[in-house]
Image (cartoon, grey):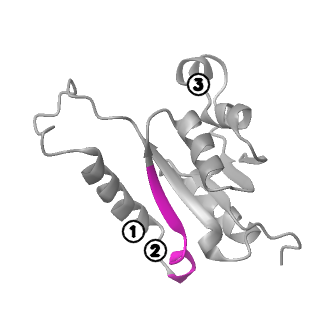
Amino acid sequence: MNWFPKRTVVVPVDFSDDSLAAVETALELVAEPSGVRVVHVLPEAAMMDPDPVWIEIDNANRAERTTEVLRQRLSGEKYEQVQIEIEFGDPGYRIADFAQRVAAELIVIPSHGRTGLGRMLLGSVAERVIRLSHCPVLVLRK
């Protein structure tokens, strides 16, 4: 049992096994499962994207489909009260902004452990979240 349970914990999820494991960690840190707020950040859809059906695909449809897939991945009784949110834009900024909007006490985020050129080219979402966050950030490493 956690001696200092949190009311709200944000968990950014990118569908990797590490990010889904972070949800498990968050569940151990909250008083109630409804205090876990899973957030997935999608890139903005642009009209110049090569998708031939871009007229039929808007952010609302993308958010709905992504939420359905997350609910499938997080199926089971212990996940029923976990809240899922979809944001659009730059992941680092949107995660920090979302955490502030929901008054999160903690962000639990996995680190993929990229170094060197991979980190320089892809950037580090965890690093950006740490710099921008208003609350503590727990970075999980393998």
Circle 2 sits in a helix, a strand or a loop, which is it?
A: loop
Q: Quick one: quadrant of the N terminus?
A: bottom right
Residue displayed at 19% across by 45% down? 57
The first of marks 3 and 2 along the sequence is 2
Q: Secondary structure at mark 3?
A: loop
Q: Quadrant of residue 114?
A: top right
Picture residue at 74% right of the left edge, 42% below the top: 134
- Residue ID at (57%, 79%): 78
Q: Alpha-carbon distance for marks 3 and 2?
A: 31 Å
**Disc 3: CA contacts within 10 A as few (<14), some (14-19) or many (>=20):** some
Say if the magenta span includes residue 45: no
Badge 1 local density, few (<14 within 10 Å), some, or many (20+)? few
Q: Position of residue 90 (x, y in %)?
A: 49, 32
Taking the spot 54% from the left edge, 58% from the top edge, the residue there is 38
Specify the amino acid type for callout 2. Ser
Drawn side of residue 25 relative to residue 11, left or right: right
Question: Which residue is tagged 3?
Answer: 123
The residue most toward the right is 3
Image x and y of residue 91, in percent: 52, 37
* Amino acid type, callout 3: Gly
> Does the CB distance between marks 1 and 2 fall below 8 Å?
yes
Q: Amino acid at mark 1?
A: Gln
- In magenta, the rendered stretch is 77-86
Q: Nearer the viewer, residue 99 or 71?
A: 99
Helix, strand or loop at label 1? It is helix
Q: CA distance from mark 1 to mark 3?
A: 29 Å
Q: Pointer 2: residues within 10 angstroms few (<14), some, or many (20+)?
A: few
Q: Which mark is residue 72?
A: 1
| Left or right of residue 98, residue 69 in this image | left
Residue position marked by numbered label 2 in the rendering: 75
